[in-house]
Image: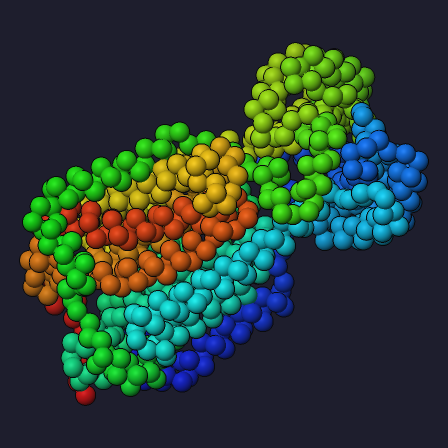
């Protein structure tokens, strides 16, 4: 690998402008091809999971699938409504029926106390398509509101909430870019003391992001995009793109400073390619393979995330191996001046040197104390509660969510529902209907006071669906317990007595319950795959089974501590004011899995970079103890700078309003912080100092010249 990387870097250094132009042509082609082919968004069917998904498939086969519904709420500031409300409801109904986006409009319904009136509007098409058409409905509602200033006429529903949430997420992401990019640039200015060099990582990161966005469009025809792909490309692309470029540039600066400026530009990039370039390739491969384990989740959301992460990581690796050497060659004079102002040190900064001296004096004590501290941070993980984040957890700065609260207060039966769907031979239709009515009678006595049942039958009589309104949000324990009774008691006692029928329980509550359960079932498989990947890649890269085991253990330690901190902060209320959130008492079911996968991949950046420096020192004749101290000390500045950039990127997600994104940003920022400053600077050197030459088992720390590259001075 090293020889091939040197050859690629040498070619780019010898022909810098063709290499630079070629890179940006590649980026333009990726975007052009992507826009030409177009993306394939995920469909409703792609989200079907577990028994709830099976039930939705049965209902869809009979044309009884859940339709997108918008609800217009008419109130008069809490007082009882009069004839003006009826007139407004008729106007709403007439206007909605005239829209091509509307399938049907139900008769107006009054609340129990007469203070609220609602009009249910069913839209054409599937649930996901409705987001794009809801604006037409909301425009009609606004017109009726202006014509009736004495009433409060507002609209909410799944499409309204979903569209507003997507818009809020987009605004939040724009704000994170406005925070992350300047802080990243400032960090790079501090590191390089050169505007030109500081701009190079950002230039390559954003060009890699653009290319990955283009490639993600044709890729979505294999793995449909659920809408988060671009966000993941931005998140991962900025982190790894800056990291890889930083590793490469810092190594080139070190070699220039070490040689006193006597090395040619080609020699600099060849050395950087052979050392840091190799680390970038191994790290990029680790991130890509780690991300690929998300495909094992058998879930469209995780497949979309995996595809995005793999594409942007591989493109970032390609940019650092091709365009970066060319840019470095063009900027050689600036790099030389910067190096003369700020010479690199192989011993690290004062703080790192101080810490390493203390660790070298008492490695066992340092290891025990630091590991115990990490385990202490992990302890809250024992109380982890995972749930899917229901609609009721969305932020109330969204007007549709404020209406959502008022609607559910006036009509609590709308909060959620159970749907029992049955498919059978039409000859058994009467038996199925009788069984479903018996089920409804049992459910009427349920402790949660399930509302009036509604039975629907497909046109061919093959599929029947029973809807049971539940006056609780899907996240409420009462709704979950009700679902358990329906599945374990009511359904077996009625439908279970029939012969050749297929049935399933779906609906809002079932969707909410089945998704986290699906994740819990897949989590052990994915974690096992991650551990295997981490072990195999580390062991193969450094030809040491011991380092493979160390990589697994340290990644588990940092991931566990980050999840423990996440649990401590977000499952309780003490940090609500500090981080601006309302605790649900739970963690989003997707967060731990994403944290494990992304962290295992990204932490390999630091691990491979640090271990490569240690191995290089050993290959150049240093004893293992000296190599550990030199390798950790020499890489500490790069690792901490790269970590600061990553933490900035991830922490910029904490102010976001969407709970799962907030939790993910916090967890990743905490994980990277712990990984860079505790794992790599304290635990790893302490452990390697204690192991000594056993670190390289089953190999040996034989002295070779494999780490050196012939260079031309001049």
Assign the N terminus to one quadrant of the image: bottom left
Q: Position of residue 93 (x, y in %)?
A: 89, 42
Q: Is residue 203 above or below residue 463?
A: below
Assign the C terminus to one quadrant of the image: bottom left
Q: Position of residue 428 (x, y in %)?
A: 78, 18
Depth check: give the residue in front, 702 or 110: 110
Q: Position of residue 377 (x, y in %)?
A: 31, 38
Q: How many marks?
A: 0
Give the colouring mode of the picture. Answer: rainbow
Residue located farthest toward the bottom when viewing the structure as drawn: 714
Q: Is residue 99 above or below residue 383?
A: below
Residue at horizontal 30 percent and vertical 75 percent from the top: 193
Residue at horizontal 36 percent and vertical 78 percent from the top: 195
Q: For residue 674, say whether it is visible.
A: yes
Residue at horizontal 82 percent and vertical 38 percent from the top: 76
Q: Is residue 648 left or right of residue 675?
A: right
Q: Can you tell which quarter of the image residue 334 is in?
A: bottom left
Q: For residue 267, say whether it is visible.
A: no
Depth check: give the residue in front, 663 or 510: 663
Q: Can you tell which quarter of the image residue 352 is in?
A: bottom left
Residue at horizontal 21 percent and vertical 42 percent from the top: 370
Q: Position of residue 482 (x, y in %)?
A: 62, 20
Q: Is residue 490 above or below residue 712?
A: above
């Amino acid at each position: 690998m090293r020889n091939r990387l040197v050859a690629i870097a040498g070619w780019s250094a010898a022909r810098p402008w063709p290499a630079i132009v070629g890179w940006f042509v590649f980026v333009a082609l990726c975007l052009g091809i992507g826009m030409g082919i177009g993306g394939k968004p995920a469909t409703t069917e792609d989200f079907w999971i577990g028994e709830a998904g099976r039930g939705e498939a049965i209902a869809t086969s009979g044309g009884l699938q859940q339709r997108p519904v918008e609800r217009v709420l008419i109130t008069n500031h809490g007082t009882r409504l009069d004839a003006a409300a009826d007139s407004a409801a008729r106007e709403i109904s007439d206007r909605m029926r005239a829209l091509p986006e509307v399938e049907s409009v139900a008769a107006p319904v009054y609340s129990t106390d007469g203070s609220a009136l609602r009009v249910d509007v069913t839209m054409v098409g599937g649930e996901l398509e409705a987001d794009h058409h809801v604006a037409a409905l909301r425009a009609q509602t606004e017109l009726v509101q202006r014509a009736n200033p004495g009433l409060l006429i507002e609209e909410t529903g799944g499409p309204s909430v979903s569209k507003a949430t997507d818009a809020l997420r987009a605004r939040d992401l724009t704000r994170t870019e406005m925070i992350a990019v300047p802080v990243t640039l400032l960090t790079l200015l501090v590191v390089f003391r050169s505007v030109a060099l500081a701009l190079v990582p950002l230039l390559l990161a954003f060009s890699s992001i653009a290319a990955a966005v283009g490639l993600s469009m044709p890729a979505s025809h294999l793995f449909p995009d659920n809408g988060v792909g671009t966000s993941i490309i931005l998140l991962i692309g900025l982190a790894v793109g800056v990291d890889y470029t930083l590793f490469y540039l810092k190594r080139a600066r070190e070699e220039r400073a070490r040689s006193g400026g006597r090395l040619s530009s080609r020699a600099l990039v060849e050395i950087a390619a052979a050392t840091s370039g190799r680390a970038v390739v191994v790290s990029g491969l680790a991130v890509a393979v780690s991300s690929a384990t998300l495909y094992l989740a058998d879930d469209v959301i995780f497949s979309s995330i995996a595809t995005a992460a793999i594409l942007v990581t591989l493109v970032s690796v390609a940019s650092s191996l091709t365009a970066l050497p060319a840019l470095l060659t063009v900027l050689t004079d600036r790099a030389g001046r910067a190096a003369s102002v700020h010479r690199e040190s192989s011993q690290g900064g004062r703080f790192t040197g101080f810490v390493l001296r203390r660790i070298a004096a008492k490695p066992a004590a340092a290891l025990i104390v630091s590991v115990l501290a990490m385990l202490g941070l992990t302890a809250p993980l024992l109380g982890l509660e995972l749930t899917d984040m229901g609609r009721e957890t969305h932020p109330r700065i969204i007007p549709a969510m404020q209406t959502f609260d008022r609607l559910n207060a006036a009509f609590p039966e709308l909060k959620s529902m159970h749907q029992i769907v049955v498919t059978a031979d039409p000859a058994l239709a009467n038996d199925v209907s009788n069984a479903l009515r018996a089920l409804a009678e049992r459910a009427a006595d349920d402790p949660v006071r399930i509302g009036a049942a509604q039975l629907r039958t497909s046109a061919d009589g093959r599929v029947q669906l029973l809807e049971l309104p539940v006056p609780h949000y899907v996240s409420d324990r009462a709704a979950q317990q009700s679902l358990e009774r329906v599945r374990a008691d009511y359904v077996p006692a009625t439908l279970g007595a029939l012969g050749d029928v297929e049935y399933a329980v779906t609906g809002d509550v079932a969707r909410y319950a089945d998704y986290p359960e699906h994740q819990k079932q897949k989590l052990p498989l994915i974690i096992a795959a991650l551990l295997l990947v981490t072990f195999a890649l580390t062991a193969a890269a450094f030809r040491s089974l011991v380092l493979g085991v160390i990589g697994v253990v340290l990644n588990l330690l940092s991931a566990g501590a980050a999840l423990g901190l996440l649990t401590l902060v977000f499952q309780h209320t003490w940090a609500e004011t500090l981080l601006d959130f309302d605790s649900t008492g739970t963690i989003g079911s997707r967060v731990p899995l994403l944290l494990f996968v992304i962290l295992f991949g990204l932490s390999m950046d630091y691990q491979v970079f640090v271990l490569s420096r240690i191995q290089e020192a050993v290959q150049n004749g240093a004893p293992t103890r000296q190599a550990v101290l030199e390798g950790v000390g020499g890489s500490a500045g790069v690792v901490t700078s790269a970590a600061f950039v990553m933490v900035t990127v991830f922490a910029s997600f904490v102010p976001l309003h969407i709970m799962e994104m907030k939790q993910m940003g916090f967890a990743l920022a905490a994980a990277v912080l712990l990984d860079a400053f505790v794992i790599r600077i304290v635990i790893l050197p302490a452990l390697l100092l204690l192991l000594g030459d056993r670190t390289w088992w089953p190999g040996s720390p034989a002295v070779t010249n494999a780490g050196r590259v012939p260079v031309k001075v001049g």
